[in-house]
Image (tube, rainbow, N blue to C red):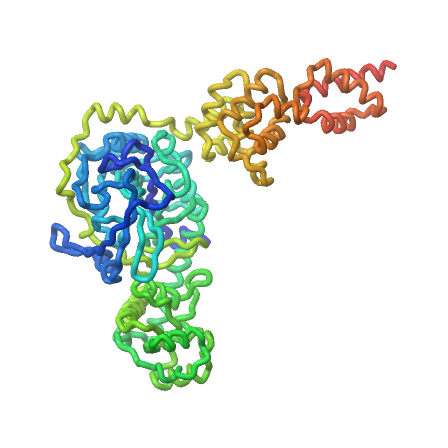
Amino acid sequence: MDYRTVGLKVGLEIHVQLNTGRKLFCNCPPVVRNDEPHFRVVRRLRPSMSELGEVDPAAIWEFRKHRTFVYEGYYDTTCLVELDEEPPHDPDPESLEVALAVAMMFNAKIFDEVYVMRKTVIDGSNTSGFQRTMLIAHNGLAKFFDYKVPIQTIALEEDAARKIEEKGDTVVYRLDRLGIPLIEISTGILTYSPQEVMEVAYYIGHSIKMTGKAKRGLGTVRQDVNVSIEGGAKTEIKGVPDLSLIPKVIEYEVQRQLNLLAIRDELIKRGVREDWFVKDFVDVTDIFSSTKSNLIKKVLDGGGKVIAIKTPGLRGILGKEVQPNRRFGTELADRVRVWTSLSGLIHSDELPGYGITAEEVSKVSSRLGVDSFILLAGTSDRDLVDAVDVIIDRIREALHGVPEETRAANPDGTTRFMRPRPGAARMYPETDLRPIRITEDMLTRAKALVPEPIESRVGRYISYGMSKELAMQVIKSPFYDLIDYLISEFQGRVPATLIANTIVNTMKSLQRDGIDVSVITEDHLKAIFNEYAQGVITKEAIPDIIAAWSKEPDKPIDGIINKLGLRRMSPEEVRKYVMERASKLGINDRSKLMNTLMKELRGKADPSDIMRAIDEYLKNSQKR
């Protein structure tokens, strides 16, 4: 697909957890735990008006779900601030300095004063009903090789609580993550390809990690992607779990918006109007009194009923695919699932099906007087009425093309509806905290945290003798800091290329072969490279040593080397072996000798010693 033709515009929001000494607004340690929580509290949240007397539409949407929230916490990582029973403390100075360093790194304009703001969030992820955030800088420009990335804003905010489970109207959150400092980088509009956007996202996150103040591990970096095309609408896709999924998410969102525009054009062509769709329904329970559909029978056995909604003019539209394995009917079902406890809906484009017969379809169609309809089955009248409302609203939106939404990323790169996009009433000042004046001392301390630019690091690695490809592998490796440390530690004694290749390629290859190299620590690697530097082992022996040591990580390296018989032979030992073995083999062809003896002596002798001995043997043979 030519993304320039469709007018693709992408924006990134990169969130990185900081590894600081305390949480952002209290003195609790920023530690995520996995053991049994010490206490639980139960809450309900409701929206409130902003300073302008307005209520955010996304907050209203969440409130109308009528949910109950259970909060789990620990006495040593959770305090009254997380429970919203105590005012927030002054922001963590260390986190603020990291944010200032990131602003400098991305050439952003730092504000003279920083104000703490409240961002309305009542999905339960914040006990207070809002997230505290601080705008640190704006209008920056990050440069990564050929990429020029406009940086719209840099913010410092508190991370949300972790969702543990969701059952019906009850959602359980864990409070240990709530309050961990989080840097948010929002880019301006990017017109790069989906693959290039993924690279940009990597470079931004990696640059923040290079400060040495970012957490590592699963869930410490999260990406939101904003996507729009010409004639479409800005869609915010939350929580893309993995960088590699970004291109697929963008591709599928472009596909979705193009298909929604095509649906709009077809509805207009058919003369379909908004006033054809009313928030009303027809009870058709009697038609299914003897149904063979297990799905409907289960609802009826539970005292529920089946209702039908007229969808005139939508025949063939409800079943139109908008993303792989997701149809326009799925878009409607998403709204139903988010708004109610119903599991979804059934539409006429997929019938007969689900055990519903052609005769039952015909009866429903005759009663409604239309050939296109939606069926809902449930035991709650409130859920059924709410479902009708959101379905009709979504169908009416279809006549205008692509609605502005906040969507969630699915594991396959497709997306699902979460809530409407927030409005201007979402943000208002935090009244419990004073503004923070940015001082020269703060800027000086922050400057010390600014890391070496990525391009400079690549150039440095190349100067060590690495290829550009290997240098880029190091840049993208989660162990880049370990590689840097080992290169510095063994400078002049172990080639940087050998250190880099061992960590980014050899260990990855062994992992693919089923060897658990996670037990190999920095101390193990230092011991291996020290033995190499002293001439005890060859570089060819290193993969075998790592593989063996992975199985016995507590054994001393001498024991591993001796067990494998991989202590390096001296040049004289190699010469003696080659002379005797070559004479016995009776081979006078250099390449054949090399092939045979290299295999026999792999890991035990330096290849250059073997070649010299072979050349000497062949020279002596010719004299004879």
Q: Which residue is farthest right?
A: 624
Q: Would residue 516 be visible to someone looking at this image?
A: yes
Image location of residue 354, percent across then percent down: 46, 74
In this view, 37 is above or below 233? above
Image location of residue 264, percent across then percent down: 34, 67
Q: Would residue 312 be visible to someone looking at this image?
A: no
| Left or right position of 312 against 26 | right
Decide which of 438, 294 is in the foreground and name it: 294
Quarter residue 394 falls in: bottom left
Residue at x-position 24% and y-position 62%:
66
| Left or right position of 557 against 358 | right
In this view, 177 is above or below 396? above
Image location of residue 2, percent across then percent down: 44, 52
Residue at x-position 17% and y-position 42%:
86
In this view, 474 is above or below 285? above
Image location of residue 505, percent across then percent down: 55, 33
Residue at x-position 39% and y-position 83%:
289
Decide which of 551, 245 is in the foreground and name it: 551
Q: Work out which quarter of the rendered image holds the C terminus and state it.
A: top right
Residue at x-position 35% and y-position 34%:
214
